[in-house]
Image (spheres, grey):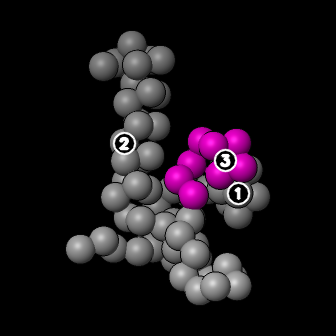
Amino acid sequence: MAILLKRPEVRKRTTLSDSSLYRLIENGEFPRPIQLNPNGRAVAWLENEVETWIEQRIEASRLQEGVA
């Protein structure tokens, strides 16, 4: 079963500001949210996609540092 995260939870898990979050989405660097209603005002993210993004950032950071 898919778990959905609302924006405050995504911000908490990623430590991104709203502007950074939406800039990354616009640039195709962060998962796009799922529209929860037809007018698109209520959105959420799939937890597994957010967690994968976090894991990828950790791995990329460690590779740059020569830790991995």
Kindly identify which numbered label has been placed on residue 55: 2
Q: Is residue 55 magenta?
A: no
Instruction: State the residue lying farthest toward the front.
Output: 38
Rounded to the nearest angstrom, the CA distance separating label 2 from label 1 is 19 Å
Asked which secondary structure carries label 3, the reply is helix
Neighbourhood count class around disc 2 (C-alpha, 10 Å): few under 14, some 14–19, many 20 upward:
few
Q: Compared to 19, does 37 lie above or below? A: below
The residue labelled by disc 3 is: 24
Q: Are marks 3 and 2 in contact (CB under 8 Å)?
A: no
Rounded to the nearest angstrom, the CA distance separating label 3 from label 2 is 16 Å
Report whether 43 appears left or right of 19: left
Among the 4 quarters of the image, the one containing residue 68: top left
The residue labelled by disc 1 is: 22
Instruction: Give the residue displayed 60% in from the left and 42% down from the top.
Output: 29
Neighbourhood count class around disc 1 (C-alpha, 10 Å): few under 14, some 14–19, many 20 upward:
some
Choose mark 3 or mark 2, whichever is in front. Answer: 3
Rounded to the nearest angstrom, the CA distance separating label 1 from label 3 is 5 Å
Residues in magenta, as a range: 25-32
Amino acid type of disc 2? Glu
**Residue 19 position in % (x across, y down):** 76, 58
Out of 25 and 19, give the one closest to the viewer. Answer: 25
